[in-house]
Image (tube, rainbow, N blue to C red):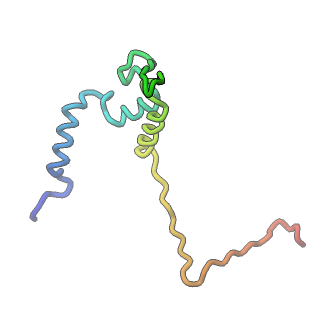
Amino acid sequence: MAGRPKGAKNRRTMKVEEIADKYITSDEQDPFAVLLMVAAGDWKGLQFDEKTKISYTAAGIEFEEYNIKLADRVSAAKEAAKYLYAQKQSIALSTGDTGLKIVIEDYSGKNK
């Protein structure tokens, strides 16, 4: 049988895994773990000393914000949720050529 055996990795996948192994040296550096730490606001897990703020000036106005912004936390939570919960599938409703018939029946007994 010619070609790669079923389940074998191609060159690109092997290269990506090789690079990831080079940089991911502990569980704290796992991309999924980092997403969850950002979502949870785990400052220490992300190697910040404490919940600190960054000050900067833009257009003459001084701003101060946390190292991990709320928008970043929400975005990380959304990304992590994709791996934790199944996504809902849309259901196509086909009525065909005959159309749709809706029948309403009253079982309450109030209209007797």
- Residue most extreme to the bottom: 98
- Residue most extreme to the right: 112
Q: Position of residue 8 (x, y in %)?
A: 17, 52
- Apparent side of residue 20 relative to residue 102 in the rendered image (left or right): left
- Residue most extreme to the front: 60
Residue 48 location, quadrant: top left
Question: Which residue occupies 43% across, 16% down?
Answer: 50
Quadrant location of the C terminus?
A: bottom right
Question: Which residue occupies 42% across, 46% down?
Answer: 82
Of residues 49 and 111, the one drawn nearer to the viewer in this rendering? 49
Residue 25 location, quadrant: top left
Quadrant location of the N terminus?
A: bottom left
Of residues 80 and 52, the one drawn nearer to the viewer in this rendering? 52
Question: Which residue occupies 9% across, 64% down?
Answer: 2
* Relative to 109, residue 8 above or below: above
Of residues 64 and 47, the one drawn nearer to the viewer in this rendering? 64
* Relative to 73, residue 64 above or below: above
Of residues 99 and 26, the one drawn nearer to the viewer in this rendering? 99
- Residue most extreme to the top: 49
Number of marks in picture: 0
Q: Position of residue 92 (x, y in %)?
A: 51, 68
* Relative to 52, residue 73 above or below: below
* Relative to 101, residue 29 above or below: above
Q: Position of residue 23 (x, y in %)?
A: 22, 31
- Apparent side of residue 72 relative to residue 95 in the rendered image (left or right): left
Question: Which residue occupies 15% across, 57% down?
Answer: 5
Q: Position of residue 76 (x, y in %)?
A: 42, 37
